Amino acid sequence: MRYQKFLLGLCISVAANLAFAAKPLVYCADASPQGFDPGLWDSSSTSNVTNQMFQGLAAFRRGSTEIIPKLASSWEQAPDAKSITFHLRRDVRFHTTPYFTPTRTLNADDVIFTFQRFIDPALPFNKAFPAQFVYPQNLGLAAQIAGIDKIDEHTVRFRLNAPNSIFLSYFAMPFAAIQSAQYAEQLLRSGRASDINNYPVGTGPYRFHSYKKDDVLRMEANPDYWGQPQRTRQLIYSFSREPSVRVQKLRLGECQIAAAIRDVDISALEDSKNIVIRKIQALNISYLSFNMKKPPTDNRNVREALDIAIDRDALFRVLFPRGDAMQAVSAFPPAIPGYNKKLKNEYNPARARKLLAKGGYPNGFTIDLWALPVVRPTNPDGQLMAQMIQQDWAKIGVKANIKTYEWGEYLKRANLGEHNVYMSGWSGDTGDADDFLSPTLTCAVNTTGVKFCNKEFDALVAGARATTDQKKRIALYEKAQEIFKRERPWITMAHSTVYIPMTRDVEGFIMAPNGSVGFENVYRREDH
């Protein structure tokens, strides 16, 4: 009798697993990834994909900014904050795919290869596939790391040139996902080094299956995953640029989760009994970034004039009708320690005209304004925002020509400095001010001269990074923000609430403070 009960239980368990396997999870994404190499890109559209397939030595606990072990089982950080030693998790296998079969588990060589790519241009793989590692470069990682030591097969030490109290957090960021050195060697031998960006091999819960650009990406559960086996066997990304299309697909059951929706779309879903909307006040910001090299925006008076000519109150009433967004004043949200509460925004067209005259443009000028081509919680309608700003600038004699491009082209052209003013944004991972300031506003970011670079600002940010004294860090960040507000490299716009809709049969999904999505241990209930 006991044996029969065991067999019955086993059959039920197998049947349940087969039922889960029959239910794919479909995510309606807003933009295609730029590629599949986590180290190459810093856009959320890419990291929201690569995060499912790759993992770092550390991670942020789901729903928080707390750092927890991932591919490293533990670590020790030196008291002087100048080194950190990682102990790697054992028996972690890289993905087996039609294009790669690993013959060993994760070891120190994989960690060293991953980070040498970021800091050593002479690395043979970098010579075969020259690439700009945007986020590592923006952090100034090459200047920070003095050396990487292989202590043994499962122990790696990073040595720094100067103290860095937040260095551990880097290892939990998407760019720091560990690549397979063995796969890289295979690609190098076959003359296909660039395929590291096209055919990914990670350690994550899902592995790459197929991709059709701007249409659909298919991933499947990793059968060799070191963590909990995934109930979702097929993870599918369906790409739709238009928010209304994603909303309609969700209502029709063509996807179970959708990318963050706009305020105006919420009412279209609230009456659906099968859909629930989750929300979180995210660590984010939208802004307009000036070209600091090209006239007239190389002139500080002009930048300030364009900033204070915008009627933010009117803009927010139209773009954020629910009132859940907050006007951005500084470079990061007020919830982050070190925020300078003394700073204020200003709306003053009369003073803006005087600043234009002071800057040498009494009769105004014509300028290009780039409208964001994708929907973001902090910028739900780039074209409408551009049109409202265009009207405000016209009142001070500035004619704005609105331009936009396909998302990948938009990012590429902006990085090359073809813009005068372009819309951008940022989401922080760590809940620390450095995560907003270092990768976006320091001189390390300014490789072409078009972005902000101020030595005094850099020294303050570096000083805050080097100390573990929280009071000193806060004082340094507050002073850095005063320089930021004086120089106006950005027109700060919004910090927003992020709304993510999903069908009620979805289990296990947890909102992230940075608005990103993660599908490990997320599945659809069979009883719904």
Image: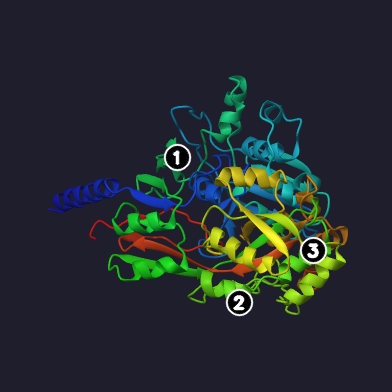
Residue at x 43%, y 39% (from the top left corner): 224
Name the residue: 75% across, 33% down.
Answer: 121
What secondary structure is found at the residue carrying circle 2? Answer: helix
Is the residue 236 above or below the residue 395 in the image?
A: above
Q: Nearer the viewer, residue 316 or 68?
A: 316
Viewer-side label of 2, 1 = 2
Which amino acid lies under the numbered mark 1 shown in the image of this protein? Answer: Arg
Question: In the rendered structure, which disc, 2 or 1, sits on the residue that comes first in sequence?
Answer: 1
Amino acid type, label 3 = Asn
Q: Which residue is mark 3?
A: 363
Please identify the residue farthest to the top as the structure is shown.
190
Q: Amino acid at mark 2?
A: Asp
Question: Which residue is denoted by mark 1 in the rendering?
Answer: 207
Q: Is residue 329 visible?
A: yes
Residue 197, how many percent across, how many down?
Answer: 57, 35
Q: Dot 1: what SS?
A: strand
Q: Which residue is mark 2?
A: 313
Residue, far front:
363
Q: Which numbered disc flags the more N-terminal residue, 1 or 3?
A: 1
Crowding near pointer 2: few (<14 within 10 Å), some, many (20+)? few
- Asked whether, in this view, residue 194 is left or right of residue 97, the answer is right
Separation of marks 1 and 3 at Cα, in angstroms: 58 Å
Q: Residue at x 41, y 60 (%)?
A: 509
